Every structure is written in C-alpha cells, then in structure tokens.
Image (tube, grey):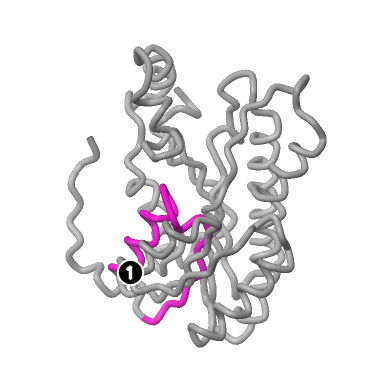
Amino acid sequence: MRPPRDPRGRAARFAGRRIYITGAASGIGRATAGLLAGEGATLALVDIDGAGLASVARETGGTAFVVDLASGEAIDASVAAAGGALGGLDGVINCAGLGEGTRLAGLEPSLWAHVLAINLSAPYRVCRAALAWFEREPRASIVNVASGEALLPSGAGAPAYAASKGGLISLTKALAADLAPRVRANVVCPGLADTAMTAGFLHGGDGSLAAAAIARYALRRAADPIEIAEAIAFLASDDASYVTGITLAADGGRSFH
C-alpha cells in the first residue's frame, strides 16, 4: 500500500502547461494524465485505444487523439494537431509501451521491429515533431518512460523489450545534451506496477509467479501506477528545473536489491 500524499500547495504546479502524453488510456499513462490535469495542465491525450481514451478525456478535460504509434506519419499529424488545439506544447511524456516476452529463438524480425517501433522509434518521432512547438517556448520538458528491465533484465524472454527500453534511456540522455539549455529530457524506469497489463500475472493463478517476482523488490510490493506518475510529474515540472539527462529508477529497489 502506498503511503498517503498531501496535495496541498501543488494544485497549480502545471498551470498553463500544455503537455502531450502517449499511452494515456490506461495504466501509468492514465494515472499521469489524471495527476497532471489535477495540478492544472492542459493535455493532449494519445493512445490507440479510443474507448479508453474517451474516458480519460472526460475525466481530465484533455483532448483525445487516437493514434497508431507504429505510424510515424500519424504521430507527426497528431503532434501538429495537438499543438494547434492546445495553443502550443511545452511538454511531452512518452508513456506508451509494448510489453513483449518472446525469447530470442522465437523472436522473428518483424516482431523485433514492431517492439522497437512502439518503444523507441515512436518517442523519437514524438520528440522530433514537438520541437517546432518547443522552439516557441522559453522552456520545455521531455519525460520518457523506459523500464527497470532496461537496467536489469529479470530473466529470459525479453530481449526485444529490454533492448528497446535500453535504447530509450540512451536516446533520452542524448536529447538532454542535444536540446539543452531550453529543453530538459529525463527518463523514468518503473518497476512492476499493478496495472491492467500485469493484472493476470499479479493476481492470477496460485500467486507463485507473482510472489517470486515481488521477492526481487526491496519494498516487497508492486507499485501503484500513481507512484510512478508522481515520479514522472516531478521530472516534468519546474520542481526539477535543474534536472536533465537523468535515469530515475522508480522500481521499489529491484535494480539494487
């Protein structure tokens, strides 16, 4: 159970900010959208799940864009439309990701390419498209969401996923150098979070697989998505105005434990 948070004094932390969030229909992206909207942000909500996205748009007042992130052209069009609808952009949060657990022997080149397209090429394309809007602002921020698997693969079966997320860490560091001083770029590496994607693993069967996974974490539990969202929000906000190029492991201690 996550400890309670006191939101007093933070209601306007994102007032006036216009932020483009991918993966906003569920999980960590949805939690991040709700948190930022509650603190004053105006949001462009991006996902391939139109129904889920519509629900989040109603909850947050954000503008929904149904986008297939495997299409670079669709990404470019959505960023242009989002900037126009919101009157500019000064933040990008790339939460969307494709989990994939195929071992190398069965990892066909087409699957490898698709995982990298969603997890690595899409964030690159979003950030590149957003530059035209960032250049109009005095400051902007990028937060990419990688994975603890990029820091420490937990076992067999994730070469494409780990490689794509490891690449995202390196891309983010390169962006921090390339886009300074106006744009900050940081990356969050979540551990196991209790989301719809992991529900079957965490709560299904006899619990033995989940117990073995949780044992790798110093805090002995999965994260609530809002805990990861709060790490993302910190890096996206002016609270982190002197922070760029870092990799923040919000992983309950798995990467050192």
Going by the numbered disc 1, the residue's amino acid type is Arg
From this viewpoint, which residue is outermost toward the right?
A: 109
Residue 253 falls in image quadrant: top left
Q: Give the mark count.
A: 1
Does 21 sit above or below residue 62?
A: above
Residue 177 falls in image quadrant: bottom right
Does 154 sit above or below residue 100?
A: above
Q: Which residue is mark 1?
A: 58
Does 39 sit above or below residue 88?
A: above
Give the quadrant of the C terminus.
Answer: top left
In-front residue for pair 177/46:
46
The residue sitting at 20% across, 61% down in the picture is 7
Q: Secondary structure at mark 1?
A: helix
Which percent across, then down, holds residue 241?
46, 67
The residue sitting at 70% across, 63% down in the picture is 125
The residue sitting at 65% across, 36% down in the picture is 161
Crowding near the residue tagged with mark 1, few <14, some 14–19, many ≥20 C-alpha atoms within 10 Å: few
In-front residue for pair 257/75:
75
Q: Is residue 17 magenta?
A: yes
In-front residue for pair 89/5:
89
The residue sitting at 51% across, 42% down in the picture is 189
**Is residue 120 found left or right of 56 in the rendered image?**
right
Which percent across, then down, holds residue 240?
44, 62
**Is residue 21 found left or right of 204 in the rendered image?**
right
Residue 201 falls in image quadrant: top left
Which percent across, then down, holds residue 251?
43, 35
Does 116 sit above or below residue 82?
A: above
Which residues are drawn in magenta? 16-38
Give the quadrant of the N terminus.
Answer: top left
